[in-house]
Amino acid sequence: MKIFVVNAGSSSLKYQLIDMDNEQVLAKGLCERIGVSGGISHKAADGRSYSAETPMPTHSEAFAAVVYALTKSDAAVIGSFDEISAIGHRIVQGGSIFPESCLIDPDVLDKIEQLGALAPLHNPAHVLAIRACIKTFGEKIPQVAVFDTSFHQTMPPKAYMYPLPYEYYEKYGVRKYGAHGTSHRFVSDRVAAIEGKPKKDIKIITCHLGNGCSITAIKDGVCVDTSMGFTPLDGFMMGTRTGTMDPSALTYIAEKENLSPADINRICNKESGMLGISGVSNDNRDVTAAAKAGNRRAQLAVDMQRYEILKFIGSYIAAMNGVDSIVFTGGIGENDPELRKEVCGNLGFIGVAVDDEKNALRGREVKISTDDSRVNVYVIPTNEELVIARDTLEIISKK
Ligand code: AMP
């Protein structure tokens, strides 16, 4: 059975075709510049590839290009789209409405659209993509929504409420929703599988560190707290995002520089974080290389981010009254041994000990803690697409 996984943005569309008989990716690709010009780059699992510049005024033309790539191009992997059993969509914001993945029907689509108020950059694009799928593939093929926020819906109110006047929660749903839930779910499930224990018996802290970063505390098998909040700006310093900081600093700067709320949003989301501090780049590789070459602002950016990661882990150890396993994932978490060593080096007080040789391994699942470490520490490559495909399969199998 083949499942088509879609991760749509307003001008881009990432996809994977997964054979669920063996959970292998058959092909993956990316459409870019939708609405502007249009282009597709597509790769089959056996190494064949196909790319083309082709006009994509809307997501419908992008899906038409994907169908061509999958069925007719030099890198085709299926004879026709009829071979695909269902489509799974990554949806960024499910609010409090969607505690789990679900089949998309007109009511669900309306609700995803309404939740656009909480994720204006993402949900409207998902809606466009779902409608384009209906137009391209017809109503017969089932479509499933898998929400980044669902895994965090188990947080208790004391973790998800902001200490603002209560009316803003009631009127506008202002609270913490979290993000990267699919990734946190995948890697915490892996911990339980690796350790051969029920997840409810393991206190886990999962660190998803990429261009966007979040840390989640998992106790009794469910998320009890997470660092991202009302939007993915919350938490700690990222590639271009501030993470949590004193809001008064922002109102002060807005008054001084005569900035609008939209300006503040742009500065905090796109111009801050590692980029804002280092002045070099938002990319961890560039910033760490500049720091090693003696750039003091780059070194400050590296130091600030690692310090904040450590503080979040420390606060979640306190919140859960302990921790059994810590996971690093995401582009930085999976590939930056120095960050892991520095963060874990400061957790010696709870008996964390990392093996330098194992910590140096890259790109695969590995336990990096020593045999006598009191806490297990892992690097686990995340696989959000596989979670989306598995949920999609499970939901259509129940139909
Ligand atoms: P993601 O958003 O998960 O794709 O992660 C992107 C981040 O991972 C970027 O900041 C990259 O610099 C970082 N990254 C990827 N590969 C490496 C590497 N080999 N060493 C350090 N950072 C890396």
Image (spheres, rainbow, N blue to C red):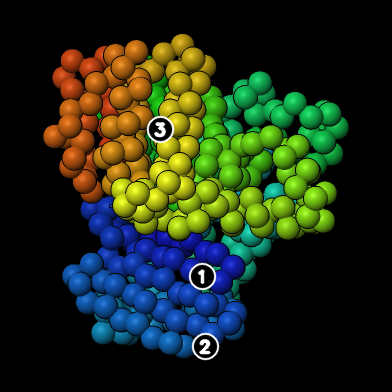
Relative placement, left or right, of 13 versus 254 is left
For the residues marked 1 and 2, what is the alpha-carbon distance in whole angstroms? 13 Å
- Determine whether the beta carbon of the residue marked 1 sits less than 8 angstroms from the nearest atom of ligand 1: no
**Disc 2 to disc 3: CB gap under 8 Å:** no
- Where's residue 354, x and y in %? 23, 26
Q: Nearer the viewer, residue 27 or 375?
A: 375
Sequence-earlier tag: 2 or 3? 2
Residue 381 is tagged as none
Q: Secondary structure at mark 3?
A: strand
Answer above or below: position of 70 versus 336: below
Answer above or below: position of 87 versus 317: below
Three-letter amino acid code of the residue under disc 2 = Pro
Residue 206 is tagged as 3
Q: Quadrant of the N terminus?
A: bottom left
Mark 3, Cα crowd under 10 Å, few <14 / some 14-19 / many 20+, is: many
For image coordinates 82% across by 56% down, the residue present is 258
List the residue tagged with mark 2: 55
